[in-house]
Image (spheres, rainbow, N blue to C red):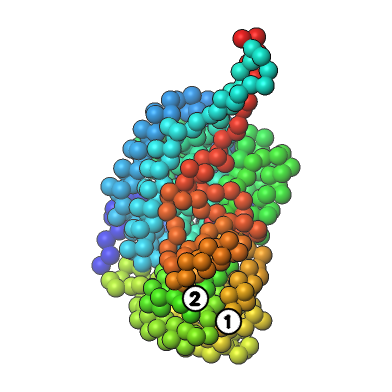
């Protein structure tokens, strides 16, 4: 019998506003379900404009105090937060698996990844440097300082409900900003857990506020508020565009981490075993539900059959089951809508000549479980060549020349992650330069780390999270011209 006692110590069925855990005024609630079983885990408030306004006002009141702390004092709070996450990693991972479905080991990896982002930004908090610019005028000095933008509004998705908020919250708090966050209604508890953690780490009331509920009402209140100076969003390109348009009305700053359609190119000269390992990591993690998951495999004709055979072996070996079951390598998809989308894209691919090598249908477990799938004979006419599948489905497209592969890889409105495998050094530099993506994995399928800038180009968004660039989006540049010296 599964013991969820420690996970439940982090489950809050309320919103955190100004240091108090509160329900929604209208007393409406949202039911939160376990995607592996369909059972209700609990409820969260169905908050809207009133609660969001209250949270923004609290963050606005808390801003002068928090931003006035010494950078080292803010850093100390963030170090405490990172330590707390690490000591509570098991409980937080269990809560994550319960509401999101991913295997427990992956959930723990996500939680520890969240701690790593907080630790990184705690360190960066002390390095918000300015500039001294040589003055072109006599008796004058020109200084550049960087100041926190103010109240930040953050909206996060369900696929990485813990770590997506870590990147935003860590950067915002390190810079001296206060925050109002809205997690996805599908996975609100891993978002609300940040409120529990912030309290335990001694972060003052009002600095971190978390609301759940009506996404469009909360989003509109955030973008309409004059007190919010920056919107940071991770999610679909459709919603990102809505929020960017609305933010522009009051000229707010925004950063957008949006959808992807990652290509993965395997050249004839690649180390085949390494490319298959990379393919598994870049495709099947989180049941294929990540924005940097490979969506399209382009495999050069000389190794096409060998790569397909090796990958098929690995895909067949994936054990599907509930995230808590021992040995599970792939959990359920998030909900029925996700299953419907995957089924439609697989049906389209097979109708257009795709050949199913592995999987291709709902898993015998039923519900939200889908078989890890591998399809060959891909063509650019298939919907999957253009649309983000967000499920455990690989399609292999053959190609002949490097130019052809790069052209097909770039034939998308997205520009988030891309991958390629080759042992030719000149090709590494040539192809890296030609790929129109914010991130390029070369001979590796794993690219996420807190020390590197995560983000995309084109319709995959604007801004970068993590790394030394990650604080820039939370800071305004101020220039001081000091005369009469
Ligand atoms: P989504 O539908 O855009 O939802 C993301 C968040 O936006 C959720 O919190 C959602 O709330 C909220 N939302 C929905 N409609 C809104 C509105 N009108 N105004 C304000 N907020 C609104 O995306 P998703 O399906 O959850 O997530 C998958 C997408 O995220 C994929 O496209 C994936 O590629 C992308 N993603 C990108 C990155 C990246 O770093 N680039 C990382 C992870 C995921 P509710 O859930 O409560 O409705």
- What residue is rendered at 51% in x and 66% in y? 426
| Residue extending furthest toward the front | 426
- What residue is rendered at 52% in x and 73% in y? 265
**Left or right of residue 167, residue 96 in this image:** left
Q: Where 175 falls versus 156 (above or below)? A: above
Q: Where 150 falls versus 271 (above or below)? A: above
- What residue is rendered at 43% in x and 41% in y? 121
Q: Quadrant of residue 104?
A: bottom left
SS at mark 1?
strand
| Residue extending furthest toward the top | 484
The residue that disc 1 covers is 399
Inter-mark Cα distance, 1 to 2: 10 Å
Q: Where 427 falls versus 156 (above or below)? A: below
At which x and y percent is residue 117? 41, 47
- Which residue occupies the foreground of this view, 46 or 150? 150
Quadrant of the image containing the N terminus: bottom left
- Which residue occupies the foreground of this view, 483 or 387? 483
The residue that disc 2 covers is 266
At which x and y percent is residue 371? 44, 81
At which x and y percent is residue 9? 33, 49
- Give the total number of marks visible in the rendering: 2
- Mark drawn on residue 120: none
- What residue is rendered at 60% in x and 33% in y? 476
Query: Pointer 1: residues within 10 angstroms few (<14), some, or many (20+)?
Result: many
Q: Are marks 1 and 2 in contact (CB under 8 Å)?
A: no
At which x and y percent is residue 4? 30, 58
Ranked by sequence position, the earlier of labels 1 and 2 is 2
């Amino acid at each position: 019998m599964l013991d969820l006692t420690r996970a439940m110590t982090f489950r809050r069925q309320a919103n955190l506003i100004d240091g108090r855990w509160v329900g929604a005024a209208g007393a409406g609630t949202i039911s939160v379900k376990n995607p592996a079983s369909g059972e209700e885990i609990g409820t969260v408030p169905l908050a809207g404009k009133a609660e969001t306004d209250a949270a923004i006002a609290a963050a606005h009141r808390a801003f002068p105090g928090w931003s006035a702390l010494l950078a080292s004092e803010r850093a100390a709070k963030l170090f405490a937060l990172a330590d707390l996450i690490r000591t509570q990693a098991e409980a937080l991972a269990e809560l994550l698996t319960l509401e999101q479905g991913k295997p427990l080991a992956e959930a723990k990896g996500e939680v520890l990844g969240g701690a790593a982002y907080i630790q990184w930004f705690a360190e960066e908090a002390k390095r918000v440097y300015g500039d001294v610019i040589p003055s072109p005028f006599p008796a004058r000095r020109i200084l550049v300082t960087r100041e926190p933008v103010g109240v930040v509004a953050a909206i996060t998705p369900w696929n990485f409900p813990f770590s997506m908020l870590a990147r935003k919250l860590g950067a915002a708090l390190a810079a001296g900003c206060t925050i109002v966050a809205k997690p996805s209604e599908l996975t609100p508890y891993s978002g609300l857990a940040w409120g529990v953690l912030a309290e335990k780490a001694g972060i003052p009331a009002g600095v971190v506020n978390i609301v759940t509920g009506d996404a469009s009402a909360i989003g509109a209140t955030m973008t309409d508020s004059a007190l919010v100076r920056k919107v940071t969003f991770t999610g679909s390109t459709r919603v990102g565009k809505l929020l960017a348009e609305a933010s522009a009305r009051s000229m707010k700053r925004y950063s957008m981490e949006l959808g992807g359609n990652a290509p993965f190119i395997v050249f004839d000269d690649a180390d085949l075993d390494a490319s298959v390992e990379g393919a598994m990591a870049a495709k099947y993690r989180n049941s294929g539900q990540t924005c940097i998951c490979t969506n399209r495999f382009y495999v050069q004709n000389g190794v096409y059959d060998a790569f397909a055979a090796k990958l098929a072996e690995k895909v067949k070996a994936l054990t599907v089951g509930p995230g808590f079951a021992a040995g599970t390598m792939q959990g359920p998809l998030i909900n029925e809508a996700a299953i419907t989308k995957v089924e439609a894209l697989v049906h389209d691919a097979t109708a257009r000549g795709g050949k199913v090598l592995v999987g291709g249908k709902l898993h015998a477990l039923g519900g939200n479980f889908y078989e890890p799938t591998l399809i060959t004979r891909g063509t650019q006419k298939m919907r999957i060549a253009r649309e983000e599948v967000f499920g455990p489905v690989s399609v292999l497209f053959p190609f002949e020349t490097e130019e052809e592969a790069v052209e097909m890889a770039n034939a998308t409105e997205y520009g988030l992650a891309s991958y390629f495998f080759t042992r030719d050094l000149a090709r590494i530099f040539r192809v890296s330069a030609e790929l129109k993506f914010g991130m390029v994995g070369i001979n590796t399928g794993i690219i996420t780390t807190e020390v590197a800038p995560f983000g995309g180009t084109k319709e995959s968004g604007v801004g970068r999270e993590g790394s030394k660039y990650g604080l820039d989006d939370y800071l305004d540049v101020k220039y001081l011209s000091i005369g009469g010296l």
